[in-house]
Image (cartoon, grey):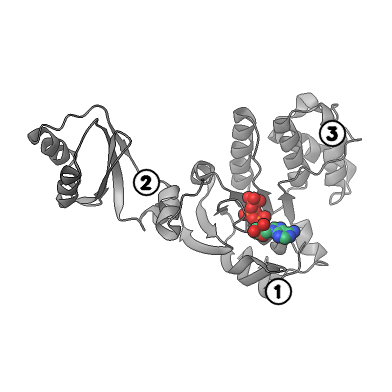
Amino acid sequence: MVVKVENLLKKYKNVTAVNNLSLEIKEGEIFGILGPNGSGKTTTINCILSLLKYESGNIELFGEKMKPEAYEIKRKIGAVMQEVAVFDELTVYENIDYFCGLYIKNINEKKDLVEEAMEFVKIKDYRKRYPKELSGGLLRRLNIACGISHKPKLIIFDEPTVGVDPQSRNYILEGIQKLNSSGATIIYTSHYMEEVEQICTRIGIVDKGSIIALGSKEELKNKLEFNKRLIIENSKVSEEEIAEIQKIPFVISAKYDNGKIFISLSKSDINVLTILEYLKDRNIEFGSIQSEVPTLNDVFLKFTGKKLRD
Ligand SMILES: Nc1ncnc2c1ncn2[C@@H]1O[C@H](COP(=O)(O)OP(=O)(O)OP(=O)(O)O)[C@@H](O)[C@H]1O
């Protein structure tokens, strides 16, 4: 087990930021911690890294207890935190060289690793630039290069794509997958369900400091009763008709909102035609029909009663 967190409890005065959180992460995983703002993701990461003291719980990394002075464990970890932490007076190259040099003493080896890290986040063209000359996305990519250049076995990314342009976002996500393919175990925190779905092999959904659901995206979606949602454009449909639709055997729920009928269909016997025939039989006019598969937002909604993003 690369990461083992048992019953972690962390309070800031009277705010319980992490509430009895437990998780285990195996070698080779890209483990996503998905939760809304303030759900305790960063606090959990800071506890895992021993940057914060906590009230109770147990944290082991690579099978050993993690402590502030566990330098041997820390060498195996790369952390890319939400706040960009680079030196303004050093260039892109010098910044990565500095952070790499904290772990790698051999000059030639270090040189190669710095080049590799720059290549990884596609920042080579900016090697002589200073941080203040970089866009937000490039700055994030520099921050990542600084955190990963020493080839850590466990890399933690805390919301690395917040406020970045789509191109940088793609470089970052692809880069993380490449790091994983080359052997690193990854922890990735985010409040963007699309990103987590795209890259994570297993996901822990957090709310109010606790994990409320855990599994692969398929396992999480299997916890839902429905596996398809129809959205039918319609100008008018009565409450009685909606109630009728709801009675169709494989319909889990039906509602009318803002000119659209939303129908969730159960896993078995999905028959869209039956719905359309029903509408046709009753002369209910409809426009475009969309079919959606469930998202992690639906999973979040099921367990918390609220949306992931407000
Ligand atoms: N230094 C602090 N002092 C007091 N309360 C804090 C502190 N840091 C975080 N909190 C509170 O702890 C809770 C969890 O915050 P945390 O930053 O861990 O969540 P998060 O999921 O990482 O959110 P975000 O995505 O906004 O960073 C929140 O209620 C937050 O207001």
Confirm if mark 2 falls within 8 A of ligand 1.
Answer: no
Q: Is any part of residue 185 visible from this angle?
A: no
The residue singled out by tag 2 in the image is 294
Q: Nearer the viewer, residue 140 or 29?
A: 140
Report the residue that reaches farthest toward the bottom. 56
Residue 276: x and y in percent read 15, 36
Q: To which residue does mark 1 refer?
A: 55
Left or right placement of residue 253 versus residue 128 in this view: left
| Mark number, residue 93 | 3
Residue 144 screen position, x and y as percent? 72, 41
Type of residue at label 3? Tyr
Q: Nearer the viewer, residue 67 or 1?
A: 67
Q: Work out whether residue 307 or residue 185 is closer to the camera in this orientation and state it.
A: 307
Identify the amino acid type marked 1.
Glu
Between discs 2 and 3, the one toward the N terminus: 3
Q: Quadrant of ligand 1?
A: bottom right
Between 131 and 98, which is closer to the camera in this rendering?
131
Q: Residues within 10 Å of mark 1 (few under 14, many from 20)?
A: few
Residues at marks 1 and 2 touching, judged by CB atoms closer than 8 Å: no
Of label 1 and label 2, which has the lower sequence position? 1
The quarter of the rendered structure image containing the N terminus is bottom right
Specify whether residue 150 is in view. yes
Q: Residues within 10 Å of mark 3 (few under 14, many from 20)?
A: many
CA distance separating discs 1 and 3 = 40 Å
Residue at 51 percent across and 51 percent down: it is 201
| Quarter residue 68 falls in | bottom right
Q: Residues within 10 Å of mark 2 (few under 14, many from 20)?
A: some
Query: Alpha carbon of mark 2 to alpha carbon of mark 3: how far?
Result: 44 Å
SS class, disc 2: loop
Q: How far apart are the two marked residues, 1 and 2, measured between alpha carbons?
A: 37 Å
